[in-house]
Image (cartoon, helix red, strand yellow):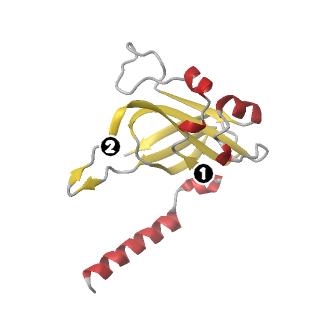
C-alpha cells in the first residue's frame, strides 16, 4: 500500500472512530458555542468581571471564573443581547449554561465530555492545539481578555456546573 493511501486510510479510521465515539454530551443534545462574547449584554458583562489571567487574588479580587444556569426567558434577557439569535431556545425543554473566564488564546474549543453527578453538571472541554508553521509554533496569544462559552442542552436537574479544561 502506498504511503498516501496508508495515511488516508489512517485518517479515515480516526474520523470514523471520532464519529462513533463522539463526546458523551450528545445524550444531553448539547450544542457548544465557544465564542459567545458578542452575545453577552454589555451591562451584564460589566457586572460580571472575572480576574485577569495571571493576576493574584490580592491584585484582583474578582473570581477566576463565573458560571450561570439559564432556565427561563427572564434570566436569558438579563444576560444576552439581540445578537444571540442563533440560540433559538425553547425553555420548556431546553436550558443554557454560560461560563466566563480569562484567557490569552483565541483558539477553538470543543466539549470532550459531559456528565451529571449529584446535581453537578461536569463539562470537560479541550482547546485546539497550537498549529505549527514549518516546525515552529505560531504566535496566537494576546493580552488577557474575558471569554464567554454557552452550552445549550436539554433541561436537566442541576444545582451547579463545573467546567474543566482537558490538556
Element on which disc 1 rests: strand
Quarter of the picture containing the N terminus is bottom left
> Residue 24 location, x and y as percent?
55, 55
Give above or below for 118 relative to 6.
above
> Residue 68 location, x and y as percent?
61, 32
Residue pictured at 25% horizontal, 49% vertical: 137
- Mark closest to the chain's N terminus, 2 or 1: 1
Count residues near mark 1 (Cα–Cα under 10 Å), then give few for <14, some for 14-19, many for 20+.
Answer: some
Residue lying at the far right of the rendered structure: 92
Regarding residue 159, the answer to whether it shows in the image is: no
Residue lying at the far left of the rendered structure: 135
Residue picked out by circle 1: 31
Residue lying at the far front of the rendered structure: 82
Gap in angstroms between the C-alphas marked 2 and 1:
26 Å
Give above or below for 122 relative to 13.
above
35 on left or right of 81: left
Residue pictured at 47% horizontal, 71% vertical: 16
82 on left or right of 18: right
Q: Please give the label number shown on residue 140.
A: 2
9 on left or right of 88: left
Element on which disc 2 rests: loop
Residue pictured at 60% horizontal, 57% vertical: 26
Observer-nearest residue: 97 or 36? 36
> Residue 37 location, x and y as percent?
54, 37
Count residues near mark 2 (Cα–Cα under 10 Å), then give few for <14, some for 14-19, many for 20+.
Answer: few
Picture quadrant where residue 80 is located: top right
Residue pictured at 48% horizontal, 22% vertical: 63
9 on left or right of 38: left
Regarding residue 138, the answer to whether it shows in the image is: yes
Picture quadrant where residue 121 is located: top right
Amino acid at each position: 500500500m502506498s504511503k498516501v493511501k496508508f495515511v488516508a486510510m489512517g485518517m479515515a479510521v480516526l474520523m470514523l472512530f471520532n464519529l462513533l465515539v463522539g463526546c458523551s454530551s450528545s445524550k444531553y443534545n448539547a450544542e457548544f458555542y465557544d465564542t459567545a462574547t458578542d452575545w453577552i449584554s454589555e451591562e451584564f458583562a460589566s457586572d460580571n468581571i472575572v480576574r485577569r489571567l495571571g493576576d493574584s487574588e490580592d491584585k484582583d479580587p474578582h473570581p477566576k471564573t463565573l458560571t450561570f444556569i439559564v432556565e427561563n426567558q427572564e434570566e436569558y434577557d438579563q444576560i444576552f443581547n439581540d445578537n444571540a439569535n442563533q440560540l433559538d431556545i425553547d425553555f420548556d425543554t431546553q436550558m443554557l449554561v454560560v461560563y466566563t473566564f480569562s484567557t490569552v488564546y483565541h483558539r477553538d474549543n470543543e466539549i470532550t465530555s459531559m456528565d451529571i453527578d449529584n446535581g453537578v453538571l461536569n463539562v470537560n472541554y479541550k482547546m485546539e492545539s497550537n498549529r505549527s508553521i514549518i516546525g515552529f509554533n505560531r504566535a496566537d496569544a494576546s493580552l488577557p481578555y474575558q471569554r464567554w462559552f454557552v452550552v445549550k442542552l436539554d433541561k436537566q436537574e442541576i444545582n451547579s456546573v463545573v467546567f474543566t479544561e482537558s490538556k
